[in-house]
Image (spheres, rainbow, N blue to C red):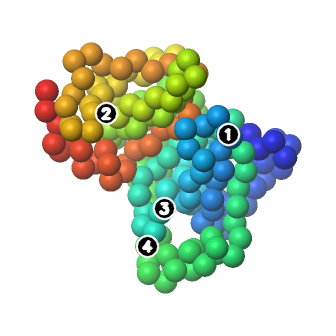
Amino acid sequence: MSQNLSEKEFKKQIEKHFRKKHYIKIYFFDDSSEDLTSGFIIKFSDTFLMLQECHFTLDGIKVIPYNRISGFRHNKFEKASERIFSQEMLIKFDQDIIKNTSLKHFESLFKSIKDQNFHCIIEGIKKDKFTFTIGEILEVNEKSVTVKNYDATGKIDKKPSKIFFKNIEFVTFNDKYSLTFRKYLKE
């Protein structure tokens, strides 16, 4: 959670950006695999923020635990982009996905993604190394998720990847990468 804001102020900012449908930039802490991302907050809970990522076009949905976020920005640059997206009629959020995605905790999140038949991308840190897993969700329990991972050539790993929730930084789904690559997988 942002180092400059109290928990109450942090959640107020999230609520404001959500309510006003702001296009925002989100900054992550230095130890994250990414520095920042941009998009629209489409849902939030006590623990997670669900962002419709947008990099000049709507891309996937990124679920971010609050403890990864160092700050937000909504200034003249984001406002200009927001105006362009609006005039180009690019701001269309899939209400079914929003409604059917649970942000209660990691277990419910992954079960809801699996139930919607999405592959997902999980970025994390394990033993001070950044990890990247992409694939079909096979199994979910209260501590971990098991994913049928594939590489950048579409080749499926022989052994599924088990990722513990404590190591997860970001979860992305309904994105162009996983939606496209799943069509070209090979054992």
Mark with earlier residue (3, 1): 1
The reply, left or right, for residue 91 in relation to residue 157 is right
Q: Which residue corresponds to mark 2?
A: 135
Q: Which residue corresponds to mark 3?
A: 54
- Kind of element beneath mark 3: strand
Residue kind at label 2, given as amino acid type: Gly
Residue kind at label 1, given as amino acid type: Asp
The reply, left or right, for residue 118 in relation to residue 2 is left
Inter-mark Cα distance, 3 to 2: 22 Å
Mark with earlier residue (3, 2): 3
Q: Is residue 132 above or below residue 81?
A: above
Q: Is residue 176 above or below residue 70?
A: below
Depth check: give the residue in front, 57 or 32.
32
Inter-mark Cα distance, 2 to 4: 27 Å
Instruction: State the image quarter where residue 59 is shown.
Output: bottom left
The reply, left or right, for residue 35 in relation to residue 12 is left
Inter-mark Cα distance, 4 to 3: 10 Å
Camera sees residue 103: no
- Kind of element beneath mark 1: loop
Q: Residues within 10 Å of mark 4 (few under 14, many from 20)?
A: some
Inter-mark Cα distance, 3 to 1: 22 Å
- What residue appears at the point 44 percent right and 43 percent down from the top-left corner? 172
Q: Are marks 4 and 3 in contact (CB under 8 Å)?
A: yes
Q: Which residue corresponds to mark 4?
A: 90
